[in-house]
Amino acid sequence: MTNKKNSIANSFLALSIALSLSSFMASSAKTGAEEAAAKPKGMEEYRAGIEAYGKKNYKGAELHFRKSIEQGNKTPAAWLYAAHTFFASGQYAQAKQTYEMVTTMFKKSPEADIAATGLESVNAKIAGGGTPAPAAEAQTEPAKGVKTAAVKDDGPSLADRVSVIAPKMGHPAVSAASIKAVKDGLAGLPVHIRKQLIEANATFNISPNMIDKWPESADELNEESEALNLAELPGRLYGSDCYIYERAKTRGSTSLKSARSPHEMKHTALNECFQVLDDKNKICKDPKLMVIYRAEADGVPETYEEKMATFTKDGEWGIRETCSELSAGMFGAAGESDSDLNRFFPRTKKWLRAKLGI
């Protein structure tokens, strides 16, 4: 069994060297997603590899990724997943060689950044003579371990509460930039806010899209309404579990649109942080806040009524949306409506700032 595995790995690496010399150097600077869209060669095997990898069937994943590349899938994502597969199955020498290839052949790409982190991990394993990584460390989400801004020594970290969901249906993996943006946003929260989120058992799940987490939901979406459906929203809260989606789904298919900016990802995460705190502490149900908010909502000029409709609705929806957006801005990631909210809800913001202690 070991000889067979080594034979496969050696064949895989030999192929990698040949392709890198003859093809990659001469290729254009397309991203993996662009090239896959233009020439979807080997994508069936690639998707099968993703599925096998997600099920921790690393031997099967290795074979699928090898076949995908042999069939012409020269995207950095294919090579990156191959490296992750080697690492997860304990083939550290092969993992190191393949990670190095990604960093060399796809410089300045998100995959190269992720591969650099993987290279650090595999070098540590080789230096320490470690045993194969357990499934939880094998990075079902290839971008795990991206470096983030330093967290203050006097407060708890939320980094261990961040999970990255592996792509399905041939979708691109969540980028290193998106993961870093979310982690940096959480690290920048005031100490007492981080502590409250931990006490509330908050988790932060970054996914290419909702259907990567729940594939069966793709057949249940309302794609006839003018309103955005769940797969088009930037995120969603389920209890204390925050979901942040990098890409919106294209209606009528399972393909995804271009990635949201790192700032948008950070904004969504911080917006949901307030929602977790609101569910825990019933902030938006405070009678004093409700009086202040309602007076300001009713005072929004008629010329802005349509633009601010989301924030002036009666009942719980309007006040929660307003406070979530205002809080995200105060936490460090203002949204596109921030200037209007600051203009029309100054007293609401002042009350929130005092309540949140920021």
Image: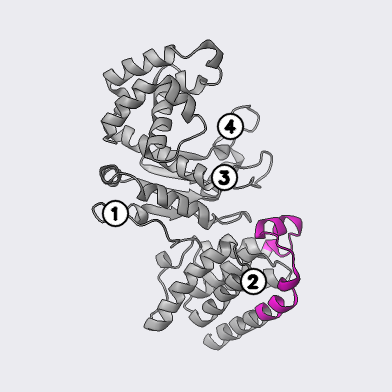
Which tag, 1 or 2, sits closer to the chain's start? 2
The residue that disc 3 covers is 260
Alpha carbons under labels 4 and 1: distance apart: 38 Å
Mark 1: which amino acid? Answer: Lys
283 relative to 263, above or below: above
Mark 2: which amino acid? Answer: Met
Q: Nearer the viewer, mark 4 or mark 1?
A: 1
The residue that disc 4 covers is 228
The residue that disc 1 covers is 152
Q: Nearer the viewer, mark 1 or mark 2?
A: 1
Which tag, 4 or 1, sits closer to the chain's start? 1
Q: Are marks 3 and 4 in contact (CB under 8 Å)?
A: no
Mark 3: which amino acid? Answer: Arg
Residue 344 seen in the current view: yes
Q: Residue at x 58, y 68 (%)?
A: 80
Q: Quadrant of residue 64?
A: bottom right
247 relative to 113, above or below: above
**Considering depth in this image, is 73 or 123 the residue closer to the camera?**
123
Which tag, 3 or 4, sits closer to the chain's start? 4
